[in-house]
Image (cartoon, grey):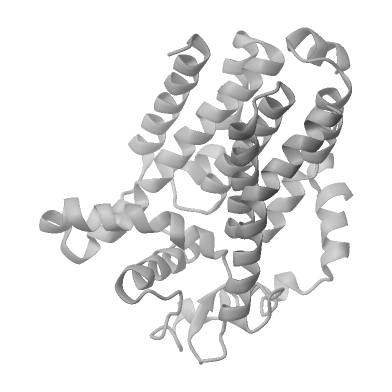
Amino acid sequence: MKPDARAALAAGAAAALVALALNPGAVDNVDSRLVLRTAESLIDHGSFALRDVAGTPLGSVEYGAFDPSGAFQMKFGPGNAILAVPFVAAGRALLGPLAGADAGEAGFALATPFWFGAAAALLRSLTSRLCGARAAWWAVAAHCFAGYGLVYGRSSYLETPLTACVLLAWLAAWRCREGGGWRPALALGAACGAALWIKTASALFLVGVPIVLSASGGRGVRASARALVAFAPLAALYLWSNDVRFGDPFETGYAGSLRFDRPAAEGSFDLLFSERGLLFHAPLALAGTAALAFRGAGPAGFRAAL
């Protein structure tokens, strides 16, 4: 194993152990409970539909919408439930004799330390390429402990696997720029597709990826075309799942929530450029994208661009 891979694995293992030590071993919020219930429905009935939540807090329009058949569908991306399925199934299989009916929930709770560790490992691998090994460790520490990362990392929110998918997309884009061939391009497409399945708005975190690829000229064009091989079917399936769940390919279940009643274009601009947006609170996201796009590879070029 290469030194960079060993360091990334060490960062991921350390982060996962911290999150595991703080993990409650159960689902502690409504959002994640809906994801858990949907994963259980997938295992038990092969369906995203929840037919027994009407009239309960879980069945509120704040958290989803009723599909054409009258069943409740959570607004959170279906990818969250799909990613939860192996953890719920493992919990039932391994913890069933001890936890009984709560075994699936215990297994699902343990997914968060895994994704928290995966995000730390990916961040270590990405930042070591850009800033050097020492700065990469500081970046991992800042991500895990200087923001909301650990708050989400000790619970079961969708932001933790989403972070891992977004970081995988950026790392794969950089590897495409380095000339990695088909493997990183397919990883890029799959990561972007997975992020979309977790939350549609995650596309806003990936807007800089085409800029990074475009700076590579023909190599970036080839990588983009290869990435579409993985991304296109995932995007098509996502639109199909929306149509099945809500009767419209472009309906995601958020429309019933009073917090999601703005036009998409206006909301996207606000999330990126307003005083509440990504670039206001994380200006290095803009500077970093520019550095990746217009300067040479390696720590010296990245620092010079910043």
Above or below, 43 against 118 in this view is below
Residue 289's x, y, as percent? 82, 31
**Quadrant assignment, res 241:** bottom right
Q: Nearer the viewer, residue 301 or 108?
A: 301
Horizontal relation, residue 178 to residue 52: left or right: right
Residue drawn 45% across the image and 69% down it:
34
Give the quarter of the figure containing the N terminus. Answer: top left
Choose between 44 and 239: the one closer to the eye: 239
Which residue is at a point 64% across and 13% down the rendered structure image? 135
Q: Quadrant of residue 253?
A: bottom right
Give residue 193's position: percent from left, percent from top: 62, 52
In the depicted structure, whether residue 284 falls above or below residue 255: above
Q: Relative to 229, is 101 on the left or the right?
A: left
Q: Quadrant of residue 149?
A: top right
**Looking at the image, which residue is at 45% across and 52% down?**
156
In percent of width and height, residue 199 lies at 63, 58
